[in-house]
Image (tube, rainbow, N blue to C red):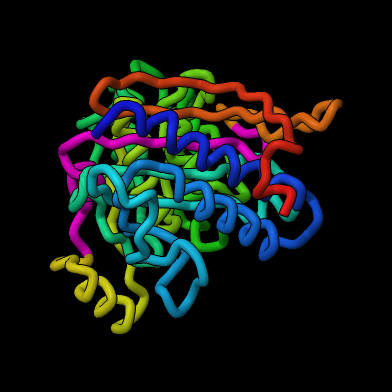
């Protein structure tokens, strides 16, 4: 893919973040998500791609914008798969909490997994643990292997997990072996990315979350040199059939990086809406300006750019409609 796309797609996540930020703390996740989605879709028109959304806001009859199968971009340029989450953490924004982001990943056509909207079991790690752990191992074994590879005691490990009732058994095991636990209220993509950032102080990300978010996290971790393993969790015959319809021959197969994002180049961009582990949130400044913090990465070069941008809001025509 052309390297110029890196900066083009970060402009898309910036506008989505700016559009959703005014809804922070207002208790209205629907309008927050709608604002981000509308802004992202509008800004895509300026990006020189012929993109197909493979991870979006749902099927065409379920979501008015950025639905799976929708064509995005200027329709000039190369064909790419597009994965989007206009507002990763709608509940976070509604409650004014941390780790909400606007996220995009793009890859050459045919490389991104068409992930169904269901739960996925996940194990995400940073570069030091790549290839050393297995999703299918019992949690005690995984933690012992991780501690040995990192030259730590198990009690020195820090594990991140979503704070959910469905994780009670995992949390009980984590506490039994004595690791430190950092809970997330929401923000599955940011959580899976955290082990790849030393400053976050996270060794592993475990538990289940959305399958689409798993693919977005895989795109980010490929750029960061980390790894995620996943396994879909269809809850009934309908969800199992949905996997088959989307071309997933074995819904219970352990999905590796190449299964989720292919073996070619990937570009990932995210802009913080609220402050998080590695990105600041949208910050309003005097004189009609706002500050955004973004990350944009490319797997081919392993270049990681953090972008601090100052926006003059009256010139953002979409935000003033």
Asked if residue 48 lies in the magenta stretch, the reply is: no
**3 relative to 108 in the view: left or right:** right
Asked if residue 261 lies in the magenta stretch, the reply is: yes
* Residue reaching furthest to the top: 151
Query: Which span of residues is magenta-colored?
Result: 252-276
Expressed as whole percent of the image width and height from the top left, the position of residue 134 reads 23, 42
Expressed as whole percent of the image width and height from the top left, the position of residue 190 reads 50, 39
Query: Between 50 and 218, which is closer to the camera in this rendering?
Result: 50
**200 relative to 117 in the view: left or right:** right
Q: Residue at x 47, y 19 (%)?
A: 198
Q: Residue at x 31, y 24 (%)?
A: 127
Q: Tell me where residue 227 sits by quadrant.
A: top left
Query: Between 138 and 263, which is closer to the camera in this rendering?
Result: 263
Q: Residue at x 76, y 48 (%)?
A: 22
| As drawn, 301 above or below 130 | above
Q: Residue at x 52, y 23 (%)?
A: 201
**225 relative to 205 in the view: left or right:** left
Task: Tell me the quadrant of the picture where the C terminus can be found.
Answer: bottom right
Q: Tell me where residue 253 sits by quadrant.
A: bottom left
Query: Between 118 and 32, which is closer to the camera in this rendering?
Result: 32
* Residue reaching furthest to the bottom: 237
**312 relative to 190 in the view: left or right:** right
Q: Tell me where residue 233 sits by quadrant.
A: bottom left
| As drawn, 28 above or below 230 | below
| As drawn, 246 above or below 218 | below
Expressed as whole percent of the image width and height from the top left, the position of residue 166 reads 50, 62
Tell me, yes or no, if residue 217 can be seen here.
no
| As drawn, 205 above or below 91 | above
Query: Between 43 and 28, which is closer to the camera in this rendering?
Result: 43
Expressed as whole percent of the image width and height from the top left, the position of residue 290 reads 73, 31
């Amino acid at each position: 893919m052309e390297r110029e796309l890196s900066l083009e797609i970060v402009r898309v996540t910036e506008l989505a973040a700016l559009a959703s930020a005014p809804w922070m703390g207002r208790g209205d996740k629907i309008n927050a998500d709608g604002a981000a989605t509308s802004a992202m879709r509008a800004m895509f028109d300026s990006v020189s791609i012929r993109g197909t959304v493979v991870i979006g806001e749902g099927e065409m009859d379920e979501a008015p914008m950025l639905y799976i199968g929708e064509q995005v971009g200027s329709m000039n340029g190369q064909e790419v798969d597009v994965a989007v989450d206009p507002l990763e953490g709608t509940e976070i924004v509604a409650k004014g909490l941390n780790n909400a982001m606007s996220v995009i990943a793009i890859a050459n056509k045919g490389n991104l997994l068409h992930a169904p909207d269901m739960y996925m079991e996940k194990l995400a790690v940073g570069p030091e643990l790549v290839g050393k752990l297995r999703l299918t191992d019992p949690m005690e074994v995984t933690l012992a292997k991780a501690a040995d590879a990192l030259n730590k005691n198990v009690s020195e490990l820090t594990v991140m997990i979503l704070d959910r009732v469905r994780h009670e058994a995992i949390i009980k095991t984590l506490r039994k072996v004595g690791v430190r636990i950092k809970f997330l209220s929401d923000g599955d993509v940011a959580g899976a990315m955290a082990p790849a950032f030393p400053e976050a102080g996270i060794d592993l990300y475990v538990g289940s979350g959305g399958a689409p978010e798993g693919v977005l996290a895989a795109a980010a971790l490929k750029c960061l040199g980390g790894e995620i393993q996943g396994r879909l969790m269809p809850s009934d015959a309908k969800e199992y059939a949905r996997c088959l319809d989307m071309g997933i021959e074995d819904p219970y197969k352990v999905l590796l990086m190449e299964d989720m994002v292919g073996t070619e180049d990937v570009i990932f961009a995210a802009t913080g809406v609220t402050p998080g582990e590695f990105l600041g949130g949208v910050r309003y400044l005097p004189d009609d300006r706002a500050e955004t913090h973004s990350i944009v990465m490319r797997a081919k070069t392993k270049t990681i750019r953090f972008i601090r941008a100052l926006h003059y809001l009256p010139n953002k025509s979409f935000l003033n409609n």
